[in-house]
């Protein structure tokens, strides 16, 4: 499985950025609850990064705008609720390469005694809501980078991660085209 995960990771387009992240031990959170929270975080990211709402057959511009504002207001309420929690301090930023197969992080963040854990990623669009992914160490690569495969991430979260990667890739292509013009 490890080599398959590495091949999938290294050959796919990836989200690359410097994000606040922390790697810690697994805390006994049930996988279903972790999956539900991660789906919510990914939906929040999609909503905050959304530029327009798809039009339905009978939707008026006013209804579409109200739906978009309602969605964003719900997200903001969730973020404010999480900010009031005592554990709102962000971990330090580190370079990340992420896709649905796993994540590449600096090897210096690894605990040599631990082969598995939870990776908390705080995206800038919603820093108060971390994406918490169960990971296991697979291998070192490049200079000082470690590949961590996702361990028990469901299909919904995998698809959500692919959408995050796609949106970032699409933005980079659009920016490159604009700068070339």
Image (spheres, helix red, strand yellow):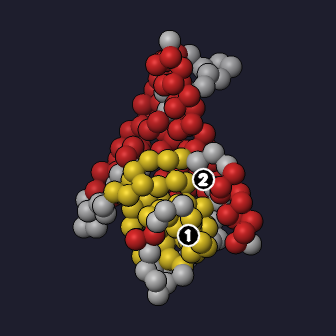
Q: Earlier in the sequence, mark 1 or mark 2?
A: 2
Which residue lies at the image location 39% right of the left edge and 62% below the top edge?
21
Task: Give the residue pinned by disc 2.
Answer: 99
Task: Please name whichever residue, 89 or 106, is drawn nearer the observer in this view of the structure.
Answer: 106
Give the residue at the far front of this rendering.
Answer: 143
Task: Give the residue pinned by disc 1.
Answer: 140
In-image side of 50 versus 128 (left or right): right
Badge 1: residue crowd in 10 Å (few <14, some 14–19, many ≥20):
some
Q: Is residue 29 visible?
A: no
Task: Please name whichever residue, 24 or 81, is drawn nearer the observer in this view of the structure.
Answer: 24
Q: Compared to 167, does 175 lie above or below?
A: above
Badge 2: residue crowd in 10 Å (few <14, some 14–19, many ≥20):
many
Give the residue at the far bottom of this rendering.
Answer: 113
Report x, y in % for residue 26.
Answer: 48, 79
Q: Secondary structure at mark 2?
A: strand
Q: Secondary structure at mark 1?
A: strand
Which residue lies at the image location 50% right of the left edge and 77% below the top edge?
117
Report x, y in % for residue 109.
Answer: 40, 71
In-image side of 8 versus 114 (left or right): right
Mark 1 → mark 2, Cα distance in angstroms: 17 Å
Q: Is residue 25 visible?
A: yes
Which residue lies at the image location 67% right of the left edge and 63% below the top edge?
6
The quadrant the N terminus occupies is bottom right
Report x, y in % for residue 30.
Answer: 55, 76
Report x, y in % for residue 35.
Answer: 58, 64
Quadrant location of residue 128?
Answer: bottom left
Cβ atoms at labels 1 and 2 below 8 Å apart: no
Q: Nearer the viewer, mark 1 or mark 2?
A: 1
């Amino acid at each position: 499985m490890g080599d398959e995960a590495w091949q999938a990771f290294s050959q796919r387009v990836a989200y690359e950025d410097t994000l606040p992240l922390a790697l810690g031990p697994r805390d006994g959170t049930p996988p279903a609850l972790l999956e539900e929270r991660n789906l919510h975080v990914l939906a929040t990211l999609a909503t905050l990064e959304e530029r327009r709402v798809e039009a339905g057959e009978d939707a008026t511009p006013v209804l579409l705008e109200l739906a978009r504002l309602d969605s964003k207001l719900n997200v903001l309420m969730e973020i404010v609720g999480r900010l009031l929690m005592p554990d709102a301090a962000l971990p330090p930023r580190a370079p990340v390469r992420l896709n649905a197969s796993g994540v590449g992080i600096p090897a210096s963040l690894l605990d040599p005694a631990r082969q598995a854990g939870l990776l908390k990623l705080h995206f800038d669009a919603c820093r108060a809501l971390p994406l918490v992914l169960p990971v296991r160490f697979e291998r070192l690569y490049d200079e000082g980078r470690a590949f961590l495969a996702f361990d028990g991430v469901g299909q919904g979260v995998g698809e959500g991660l692919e959408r995050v990667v796609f949106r970032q890739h699409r933005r980079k292509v659009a920016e490159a085209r604009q700068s070339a013009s």
